Image (tube, grey):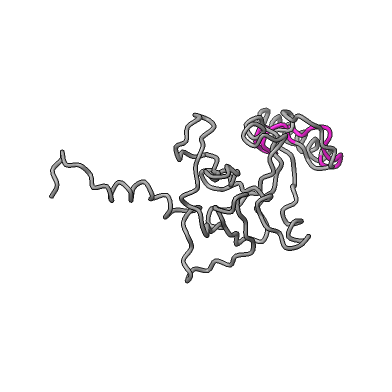
Amino acid sequence: MPSANSVEHPNTQKEKVEEWKKRAPYRIHESNEHFKARYEASCHCGKVKYELSREEPLDSKLCHCTTCQTSHAAPFQWAAIFHKDDINFRDGHHHLEWYDPSTKSVEHKLPCKVRCNYCHSPIMDEGRNMILLFPSLIKFQNDQEKRNFKPRLHMFYRERVMDIPDGLPKWTGLNEGEGSDLIEDSPPDMIRDLERKRVKEQKDRSASETG
């Protein structure tokens, strides 16, 4: 048995460093697993390649927060939300690198941003439970596949650098129920429905306080 002062074997250190490869979303699905690849995607240089098994994302959003603007050097970010087990990396594990915008470090600390360390293409944002993929990396085969990823709303629209009058709901923060308000540029029917909902919630609170 090694003593308390013994130096840890290099192979053991390497196993600890690469433990992340065995966990979703980075682990490679075995051939006997029930993983049906519906989409293929890659970074700009092609060193990082992955597959997706879900036909449609859980959600698809346009984010206007200043962090996304800066990290993508773009006016907003288009992100599609998936479960971590919906992705299978075919190649390029050793070309992945992380960035934690909250501490400005390159440690694998959630939530974090993931990109290729060769061409520096953004690959995804990894959260604690979900991943936000960037559909522009996906090799769509037809228009229907593109429509599956059509954005459904704007978030952090108050921080926008340009107006986008596309008729989609526009939230000041994340979305409904997250302390966010709907901006007037959103669809009129949705604004009216949310106003009715707010009025009802206020009446219910007043009734419970006086009851």
> Hey, which quadrant is residue 174 in on the image?
top right
Q: Looking at this view, is 159 or 207 the one in front?
A: 159
Q: Residue at x 28, y 51 (%)?
A: 11
**What x and y, as percent, mark residue 206?**
71, 29
Q: Nearer the viewer, residue 209 or 118?
A: 118
Residue 182, given in percent of the width and then of the height, sits at: 76, 34
Provide the major secondary structure of the magenta segment.
loop
Up/down of 141 relative to 123, above or below: below
Q: How many marks?
A: 0
| Rendered position, 109 above or below 45 | above
The correct choice, above or below, for 159 with respect to 169 in the image is above
**Residue 76, image x, y percentages:** 71, 37
Span shown in magenta:
171-190
Q: Is residue 133 left or right of residue 8?
A: right
Report x, y in % for residue 114. Answer: 54, 43
Q: Residue at x 58, y 47 (%)?
A: 123
Q: Is residue 32 magenta?
A: no
Looking at the image, the residue that sits furthest to the bottom is 32
The residue that appears at 70% across and 33% down in the rendered structure is 156
Q: Quadrant of the C terminus?
A: top right
Quarter occupied by residue 141: bottom right
- Residue 28 vertical placement versus 185 (above, below): below
Residue 176 lies in magenta, yes or no? Answer: yes
